[in-house]
Image (cartoon, grey):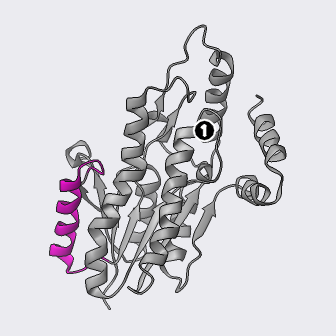
Amino acid sequence: MDRKVILITGGSSGIGKAIGTFLTSKGYKVYGTTRNPHNHPDFDAFELIQLDVKDVESIQRAVSEVVSKEGRLDVLINNAGKGITGPIEETPHEEILDVFDTNFHGPVHVMKAVLPQMRQQGGGAIINVTSIAGYMGLPFRGFYSATKGALGLITEALRMETKDFGISITNVAPGDFATNIAAGRYHAPVLQGSPYEDKYAQTVDSINDDVNSAGDPIKVAEAVYKIINQKRPKVHNPVGAFMQKFSLVLKNILPDKLYEKLLLNHYKL
C-alpha cells in the first residue's frame, strides 16, 4: 500500500504541528488543518487546509478535499482544542459552551465525517488527543478536565461500536508540554473581592509555570507514530513527565480523599 494519508486537526502550531512535522519526516502524507490558512503564509512543514471544528460544513469540505486528492484517508488525529481556567461558579457559561464545542463536539463531528470513508476503504485509525487532565477533576481547570474526560469516554464507546469495521480508535493523553496553548487559553477574570480571588490567581500562576517548564512536544509525536504502527494499540496512552503519568496510577489505587489531598498539596490550596 502507498504511504498513509493523515489528517491532523489543529495542525498549524503546538502539538499538532509537532506531530505533523514528525510524521512527514517518516514519509507519511500529512494534511494539517487550521481555521484560517491565510494566517500562516510561510507555513511549509506540510500542507494546511481550512477546517473549523465548530463548523460541520467546513469539516465535511476538508475531509472531502483530502479524499478527492488522495483517494483515501488512513489516519485522523483529532488534536484541535483550547484551554480554559476559572472557578466553576464564576466562569461565563458562553465560555463553557465554547470550550465544549471545540474540545468535545468538534472532535465528535470530525469522527463522524471520516468514519464512512474509513469503513468504505476497509480500515483506518482515529487517535483522539485528550489530556492527562481528563482523568481527574483539577481545581480551576474543571471544564477543561471535563471536555477531555468526555472525549476519552467517547473513545472507549466508539471502539466497541466500530470493532467490526477494521478501524483502530484510541487516544493519546499529553501532560504538560511546551506549546502556545497558554496564549489561546481562556482565563476567567480574577474578580476583586471574589471568595476564589487569591487561590485562583495562585493556581493560574502555577499552571503557567508548569507549561513554561514543560517538555518537548516531539514526545507526543513519537507516541502517535508508535500508535499508528501498532496492530493493537492500547486504548489510553498517557505521555508526559514521570510524575504526571504516575499520578494516573495513584488515581486508580488511592482512596479518593487521599488523592484529593495530594492534588490540593500540589496546587498549595
Residue at x 42% of width, y 52% of height? 104
Residue 18 in the image: x percent, y percent?
Answer: 45, 58
**Measured along the vertical axis of the image, is residue 30 above or below residue 173?**
below
Assign the magenta stretch its main secondary structure: helix
User: From the viewer's perspective, is 205 left or right of 71?
Assistant: right
Q: Amino acid at mark 1?
A: Asn
Q: Is residue 219 magenta?
A: no
Task: Please state which of residues 50 and 97 is positioned toward the viewer in this rendering.
Answer: 97
Range of residues picked out in magenta? 52-73
Is residue 106 positioned above or below 267 on the image?
A: below
From this viewpoint, is residue 11 visible? no
Whether residue 236 sits left or right of residue 108 in the image: it is: right
Which class describes the residues within 10 Å of circle 1: few (<14), some (14-19), or many (20+)?
A: some
Q: Position of residue 13 (x, y in %)?
A: 40, 49
**Residue 19, percent from left and from top:** 45, 62
Please identify the quadrant where the N terminus is shown: bottom left
On the picture, is 152 further left or further right than 176? left
Based on the displayed image, in which of its 4 quarters is residue 138 positioned?
A: top right
The residue singled out by tag 1 in the image is 212
Relative side of 170 to 59, left or right: right
- The residue at the point 51 percent across, 64 percent down is 221
Helix or strand or loop: what does disc 1 sit on? helix
Query: Which residue sits at x=75%, y=53%?
Result: 247
> What residue is rendered at 52% in x and 56% in y?
130
